[in-house]
Amino acid sequence: MYGASTLVDIILLLVDREGFDSLCSKPLGELLEGMESRALRALRPESDSRFHRSFDVDIEGDVMEWSDAKDNLDHSKSLSEQGLDSESSCELALALARWCSLGEWSCWDARLFLYLEPFLGRNLSGEEFLQQQVWSEFSDSLSRTDRASYSESVVLDWMSRRQNLGETMEPSEDPRILPTMESHRSASESLFDFLSRARSEPLSILIGREFLDPNLWNLDSQSLGEALEVAA
């Protein structure tokens, strides 16, 4: 269990689900050849410049490294037909989901309480950040406000929490005040943009956490393993 003080990133990715399903259903040989020859780059969705996205070459390298570590792969069959254990299958599926993502947003889970709880009107546990239902509910709440109002509410809530703990809000007494305030403002504005993009298009959200087993990542309220079965 991760506590509120754990500095681990929660990671959200905007995923083209149709593209992901298509890659997962390809014969493995065709997929690996496309990654090795860089031929699949033309099929990768256009990135959203407002967000970070893994480089093509990094994911291609991950895919080929995964392949090199596996024995007895049947290149005529898709990933879900390989008979691999869930961890091995989902390791490649996570790389393919990153390939099909338009961008990602990440944040320390210790900070996410500030960004979600006031708009949901209840306290959250750290594990709830991995649940699609929580993010859907939060996104719906954001749809009823605007970017500036949301960001301002996050900053005000952060200030209130500091004051309740007896912490100073004077920059002259704590030089971290202004940089932290700006960090919260920037992160909340970026999160607002991320979820607005997700609502405006038929995009899926992949939810995970640093160091989380690939089979525990969540795509459209399914584990990656379950998503693979759908794509088969």
Image (cartoon, rainbow, N blue to C red):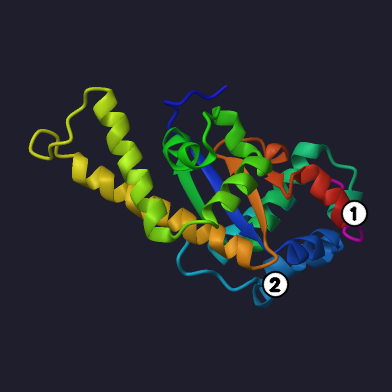
Which contiguous range is marked in magenta? 71-78
Number of numbered discs visible in the structure rendering: 2
| Residue 58 in the image: above or below residue 168 | below
Q: Residue at x 12, y 37 (%)?
A: 170
Instruction: Pinpoint residue 218: horizontal percent, then vertical percent.
Output: 70, 43
Which quarter of the rendering shows the N terminus?
top right
Amino acid found under the numbered disc labelled 2: Leu
Residue under the image location 91 percent in, 57 percent down: 77
Q: Does the magenta stretch include residue 133?
A: no
Q: Which amino acid does label 1 sit on?
A: Asp
Does dot 2 land on a helix, a strand or a loop? helix
Residue 66 visible to an observer of this rendering: no
Q: Which of 41 and 62 is in front in this view?
A: 41
Q: Give the x, y percent position of residue 153.
A: 37, 47
Looking at the rendering, in which quadrant would you find the C terminus?
A: bottom right
Instruction: Give residue 155's mark.
Output: none
Residue 40 image label: 2
Q: Residue furthest left?
A: 172
Using the rendered image of the protein, determine whether residue 210 is visible from the camera's viewpoint. yes
- Neighbor class of circle 1 (other Cα within 10 Å; few <14, some 14-19, many 20+) is some
Residue 186 position (above or below residue 37): above
Q: In this view, does 112 lie to the left or right of 207?
A: left
Q: How crowded is mark 2: few (under 14 residues within 10 Å), some or many (20 or more)?
A: some
Residue designated by label 1? 74
* Left or right of 113, for residue 126: right
Give x and y (percent) for residue 11: 54, 46
Residue at image position (52%, 59%) is: 194
